[in-house]
């Protein structure tokens, strides 16, 4: 099928990102990734990264309205302040408040000045949605798939969650279900065999998918540093990953969201 062919071509094309002589520091980089995201969350981290890449935020504003609190790091504050043409000091004074949690676990992180029952201060219904969308906080970039809370829920429930409140997720699940309905058993078995294998292009795709997840979860700078340590010129772009991410997500999840073949 066209989707499978596209996914295989995209996976093979990732080889062009490899440095001459192959990846460098692979063992130590994987250890660092394990420290950043514990291996117990591994299958759910990869699955949710694939779904995140495939889902397109429709800026409906439900997250902006329904989230009780939005955490921002100091890097988030600097980025948003620049975008708004404000000093960091003024932005933090006018738009943030102390974090709900105390101690070392939050460091310098703060919360956007959002009161319970009110929308995010950057929500604008006329846009629609977020008026700082290009520079929104990292926790908003990661939503809904790669938030810490969702990963914890996935690991606890042993399944990948769907999000009834999110129209983008609903469209993506329908697309995957349609693909499932059109795929015959031979094609399903071929995909299963492919992702069960230790073929170099499959292993590389998983590594790149993990790297993309780090980019979404921790930000561009952290992911770019990992990429440089691997000898890569850059982190792969979203479009380079989407074709394979689709067939990977289909192969990984059954109709109830349970993890299948890794």
Image (tube, grey):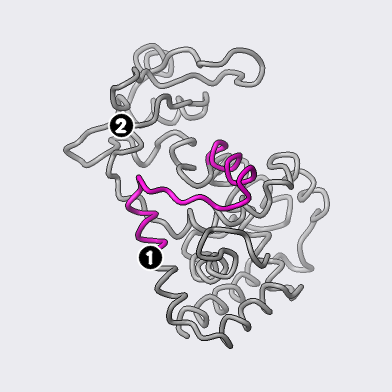
Q: Residue at x 69, y 66 (%)?
A: 204
Q: Residue at x 81, y 53 (%)?
A: 25
Is 161 contained in the magenta span? yes
| Residue 181 screen position, x and y as percent | 43, 78
Q: Of discs 1 and 2, which sits in the foreground?
A: 1
The residue that disc 2 covers is 65
Within the magenta stretch, is there residue 215? Answer: no
Give 92 or 16, whichever is nearer the viewer: 92
Residue under label 1, please give it: 174
Q: Considering depth in this image, is 133 or 5 the residue closer to the camera? A: 5
Give, as a single range, the part of the protein colored magenta: 147-173
Residue lying farthest left? 126
Q: CA distance from mark 1 to mark 2?
A: 25 Å
* Percent of width and height locating residue 225: 66, 45
- Nearest the camera: 199 or 20? 199
Label 1: state its secondary structure.
Answer: helix
State the predominant SS element of the stretch in magenta.
helix
| Count of numbered badges drawn on the protein | 2
Q: Residues within 10 Å of mark 1 (few under 14, many from 20)?
A: few
Quadrant of the drawing holding the C terminus:
bottom right
């Amino acid at each position: 099928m066209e989707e499978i062919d596209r996914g295989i071509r995209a996976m093979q094309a990732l080889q062009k990102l490899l440095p001459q002589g192959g990846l460098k520091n692979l063992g130590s980089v994987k250890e660092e990734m394990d420290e950043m995201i514990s291996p117990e969350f591994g299958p759910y981290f990869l699955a949710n990264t694939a779904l995140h890449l495939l889902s397109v935020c429709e800026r409906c504003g439900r997250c902006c309205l329904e989230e009780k609190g939005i955490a921002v790091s100091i890097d988030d504050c600097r980025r948003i302040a620049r975008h708004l043409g404000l000093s960091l000091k003024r932005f933090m004074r006018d738009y943030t408040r102390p974090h709900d949690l105390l101690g070392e676990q939050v460091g310098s992180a703060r919360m956007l000045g959002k009161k319970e029952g009110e929308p995010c201060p950057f929500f604008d219904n006329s846009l629609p949605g977020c008026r700082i969308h290009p520079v929104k906080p990292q926790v908003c970039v990661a939503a809904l798939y790669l938030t810490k809370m969702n990963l914890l829920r996935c690991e606890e429930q042993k399944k990948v969650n769907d999000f009834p409140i999110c129209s983008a997720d609903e469209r993506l699940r329908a697309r995957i279900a349609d693909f499932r309905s059109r795929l015959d058993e031979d094609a399903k078995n071929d995909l299963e065999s492919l992702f069960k294998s230790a073929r170099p292009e499959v292993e590389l795709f998983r590594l790149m998918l993990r790297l993309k997840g780090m980019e979404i979860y921790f930000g561009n700078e952290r992911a770019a540093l990992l990429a440089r340590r691997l000898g890569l010129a850059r982190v792969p772009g979203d479009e380079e990953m989407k074709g394979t991410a689709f067939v990977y997500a289909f192969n990984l999840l059954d109709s109830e969201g349970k993890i299948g073949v890794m």
